[in-house]
Image (tube, rainbow, N blue to C red):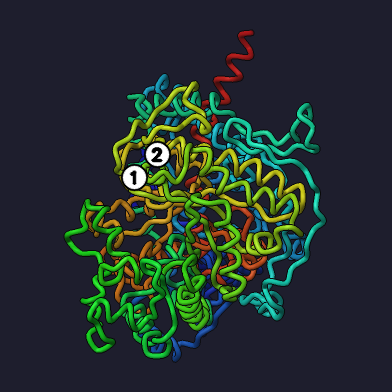
């Protein structure tokens, strides 16, 4: 063995440390294979000394991959007669079967001990306690969950590959950017990852309690079904506070006296936000910082490729070891889908035909003062049910919609008729949205039938009138539009310029009044607004939508025109919309949290097209974003999105029709580097063909980019983590302790994601954060010693 004969100084700096191995105890009569980790990652008894061979050492379960039969991680004994029958069937996983003479095994174990000793000196995070029989009943601890696999370790004084001055500067700027995001998230009751917060020394109590890891028998994977009506909820008492808008942001006053001070609900003021935006924009254009971030992202990508080469078989083995869990029956959430296009084109066609057959004589619209039945509407178009085809509907995006958002928006009108869109795809029409409610319930029924698919549907509030919220809530309650598999996001289209041109409003402040005032009123006095209060229990956040490629002035200064004085016909820039949505939501969340009510998150469309400043807004103010394609052009922001673990809902099929060809999509690079990405459908009506558009999205991505089963399950787990479904539901879907860091928060029996993959992601993030914060802390200590 030439490698083991080298001196330590001759060994290469890049080492693959094989932490995954088995103790083979061979005697003349039987073979024993031992491992010390169960499929779920729990420790078991270490291997005992075998008297006949004198070989001892720890076993390695590899996140559940242990043993030839059953892969249970326990001991397995085979007679020599059995071995002949077993070996031919084990060719696909040769590492599970002892195939070497005893001397080679002894040499390998000796080398293993040397490498392990060196690795323990270098590994800053390896604090796993040694397992002894008397310690088996120790209380639950995160360090009990250490996955065994082949790690890549890079040793040396400086592993960043850039000059020390650049590293120190980059570290200072990155820490400052992370502190900024943490401040904005904290001020608005949105989430920030525990791991990064721990490095920032700013962990705040989440109010979430962790329990012992429970089996599926003790804590079922399916949440209990709701038995009573979802619309019967407790009404808190009215507060009768006064709600007033101050410079575009609503504030809560305990009384209506003009001298009264508002309740202390803090939020970042506009001049502070402008200053933070300018600092971030100068940061993403900083040359040395761009180089540093690009190198780190390239390193992360290469590190993942090495991880796959070394551990692919082990990940697959641990997945095979889990009973009754595969990609088809793990929870997935469609994190970005619009309600008006959540059905496929065939479903819409079938629904229109069925409605025309059963409700032909029902009045559905009023044209020029004349009521028209559904039959008359189709007669006016010279159409019968027999004429209707998918091609006639013409709702599918094609090559002509590429970079043509106007043509894409026209696809929302079946047969090119805005009247049909109003009848079938609107909540506020002559029928009070009855047809739309029925088709949404059919889609929800498909989700419930599939059992494991869930969706976060976007409903529109335009801000045109103050009663939009009331009408929307009444539509949901009267139509009983509810499913355990569905939650709502409210999308606010950026259409002020159109409203202003059509003289529907006088200033931008009116949009803010119409969108947020009803929410403050319902939180303040729920008994006076019972419909809105009830509906808000199932709303999880806000989205901002429109064509991002519209020309705009992306930056503005602190003395920009306030909303009440924005009266010209120019549309405010993206950052202006997002800031005022964020600021009002921040105050609303604090008000609702003080009353014990659910809070909201901001999850805008961001980075699909347009200037990169949109992504800076998303970084500062959004919990998650949708699309994020432009991150591929901004390495500094991409690295920050990784460090802050910001969720990105990506829709490659949608992008393929509108902005970016499928093969150029950065999705596989984002996934490899460790960004929190999930797959979503965006608009099944325009982009998908099958009854299960989310599975269609996954299947095409898997085929084109050769995703493994482990990749697919990781994406599904990401989608649940970044979704707005209730914490208790996620505990059933992902495990009671899913909020814990690293392997301790993973339950492979529910997620089908191997502990190996979760450990790799967690340790990679720790490494990156440690590199940055180590240098930053050394700078602070050096500065303090000079004072």
Q: Residues within 10 Å of mark 1 (few under 14, many from 20)?
A: some
Q: CA distance from mark 2 to mark 1?
A: 9 Å
| Residue drawn 60% across the image and 36% down it | 249
Q: Position of residue 358 (x, y in %)?
A: 42, 90
Dot 2 falls on a residue whose secondary structure is helix
In this figure, which residue is indicated by the disc labeled 2? 614
* Residue 686 falls in image quadrant: bottom left
Q: Position of residue 351 (x, y in %)?
A: 38, 82
Between discs 2 and 1, the one toward the N terminus: 1
Image vertical order of residue 562 relative to residue 710, above or below: above
Q: Is residue 315 left or right of residue 784?
A: left
> Which quadrant is home to the N terminus?
bottom left
Taking depth in this image into account, of 417 and 398 the one nearest to the observer is 417
Verify CB contact (< 8 Å) between mark 2 and mark 1: yes
| Residue drawn 76% across the image and 47% down it | 594
In this figure, which residue is indicated by the disc labeled 1? 548
Q: Is residue 259 visible?
A: yes
Q: Position of residue 293 (x, y in %)?
A: 38, 34
Taking depth in this image into account, of 203 and 230 the one nearest to the observer is 230
Taking depth in this image into account, of 766 and 209 the one nearest to the observer is 209
* Residue 132 falls in image quadrant: bottom right
Dot 1 falls on a residue whose secondary structure is loop
| Residue drawn 39% across the image and 72% down it | 370
Q: Is residue 325 visible?
A: no
> Which quadrant is home to the C terminus?
top right
Taking depth in this image into account, of 450 and 565 the one nearest to the observer is 565
Residue sticking out furthest to the front: 369
Residue sticking out furthest to the left: 400
| Residue drawn 56% across the image and 65% down it | 487
Q: Position of residue 442 (x, y in %)?
A: 47, 80
Q: Residues within 10 Å of mark 2 (few under 14, many from 20)?
A: many
Q: Which disc number belongs to residue 384?
A: none
């Amino acid at each position: 063995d030439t490698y083991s004969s080298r001196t330590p100084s001759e060994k290469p700096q890049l080492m693959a440390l094989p932490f995954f191995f088995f103790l083979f105890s061979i005697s003349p009569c039987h073979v024993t294979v031992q491992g010390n980790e169960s499929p779920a990652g729990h420790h078991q008894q270490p291997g005992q000394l075998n008297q006949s061979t004198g070989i001892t050492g720890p076993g390695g379960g590899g996140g559940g991959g242990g043993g030839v039969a059953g892969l249970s991680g326990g001991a397995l004994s085979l007679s020599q007669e059995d071995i002949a029958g077993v070996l031919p069937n084990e060719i696909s996983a040769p590492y599970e079967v002892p195939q070497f003479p005893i001397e080679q095994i002894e040499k390998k174990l000796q080398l293993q001990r040397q490498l392990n000793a060196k690795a323990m000196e270098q590994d800053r995070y390896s604090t796993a306690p040694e397992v002894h029989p008397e310690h088996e009943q120790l209380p639950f601890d995160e360090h009990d969950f250490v996955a065994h696999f082949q790690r890549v370790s890079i040793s040396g004084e400086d592993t960043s590959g850039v000059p020390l001055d650049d590293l120190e500067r980059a570290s200072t700027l990155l820490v400052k950017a992370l502190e900024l995001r943490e401040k904005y998230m904290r001020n608005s009751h949105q989430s920030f990852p525990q791991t990064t917060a721990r490095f920032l020394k700013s962990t705040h109590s989440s109010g979430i309690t962790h329990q012992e890891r429970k089996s599926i028998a003790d804590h079922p994977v399916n949440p209990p079904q709701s038995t009573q009506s979802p619309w019967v909820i407790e009404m808190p008492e009215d507060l009768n506070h006064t709600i007033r808008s101050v410079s575009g942001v609503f504030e809560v006053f305990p009384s209506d006296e003009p001298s009264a001070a508002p309740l202390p609900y803090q939020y970042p003021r506009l001049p502070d936000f402008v200053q933070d935006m300018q600092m971030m924009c100068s940061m993403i254009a900083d040359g040395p910082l761009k180089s540093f971030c690009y190198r780190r992202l390239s390193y992360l990508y290469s590190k993942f490729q090495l991880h796959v080469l070394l551990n692919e078989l082990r990940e697959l083995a641990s997945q095979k070891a889990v009973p009754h869990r595969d990609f088809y029956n793990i929870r997935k959430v469609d994190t970005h889908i619009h309600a008006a296009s959540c059905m496929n084109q065939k479903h819409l066609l079938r629904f229109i035909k069925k409605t025309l057959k059963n409700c032909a004589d029902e009045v559905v619209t009023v044209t020029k003062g004349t009521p028209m039945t559904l039959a008359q509407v189709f007669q006016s178009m010279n159409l019968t049910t027999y004429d209707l085809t998918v091609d006639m509907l013409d709702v599918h995006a094609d090559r002509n919609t590429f970079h043509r958002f106007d043509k894409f928006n026209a696809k929302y009108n079946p047969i090119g008729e805005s009247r049909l869109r109003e009848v079938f795809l609107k909540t506020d029409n002559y029928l009070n949205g009855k047809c739309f409610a029925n088709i949404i319930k059919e889609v929800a029924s498909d989700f419930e039938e599939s059992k494991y698919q869930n969706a976060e549907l976007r409903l529109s509030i335009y801000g045109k009138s103050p009663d939009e919220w009331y009408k929307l809530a009444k539509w949901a309650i009267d139509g009983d539009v509810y499913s355990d598999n569905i939650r709502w996001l409210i999308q606010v289209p950026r259409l002020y310029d159109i409203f202003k041109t059509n003289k529907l409003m006088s200033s931008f402040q009116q949009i803010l009044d119409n969108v947020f005032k009803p929410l403050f009123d319902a939180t303040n006095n729920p008994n006076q607004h019972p419909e809105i209060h009830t509906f808000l229990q199932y709303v999880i956040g806000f989205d901002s939508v429109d064509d991002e490629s519209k020309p705009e002035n992306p930056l503005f200064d602190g003395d920009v025109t306030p909303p009440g004085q924005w009266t010209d016909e120019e549309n405010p820039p993206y950052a202006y919309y997002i800031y005022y949505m964020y600021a009002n939501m921040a105050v609303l969340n604090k008000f609702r949290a003080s009353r014990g009510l659910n809070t909201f998150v901001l999850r805008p469309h961001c980075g699909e097209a347009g200037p990169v400043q949109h992504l800076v807004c998303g970084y500062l103010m959004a919990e998650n974003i949708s699309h994020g394609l432009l991150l591929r052009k901004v390495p500094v922001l991409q690295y920050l999105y990784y460090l802050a673990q910001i969720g990105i809902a990506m829709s490659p099929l949608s992008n393929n029709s509108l902005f970016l060809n499928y093969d150029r999509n950065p999705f596989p690079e984002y996934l490899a580097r460790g960004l929190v990405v999930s797959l979503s459908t965006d608009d099944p009506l325009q982009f998908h063909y099958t009854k299960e558009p989310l599975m269609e999205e996954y299947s095409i991505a898997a085929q084109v980019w050769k995703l493994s089963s482990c990749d697919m399950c990781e994406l599904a787990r990401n989608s649940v983590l970044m979704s707005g479904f209730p914490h208790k539901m996620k505990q059933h879907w992902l495990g009671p302790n899913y909020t814990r860091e690293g392997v301790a928060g993973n339950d492979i029996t529910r997620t089908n994601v191997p502990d190996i993959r979760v450990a790799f992601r967690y340790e990679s993030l720790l490494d990156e954060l440690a590199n940055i914060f180590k240098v930053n802390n050394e700078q602070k200590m050096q500065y303090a010693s000079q004072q």
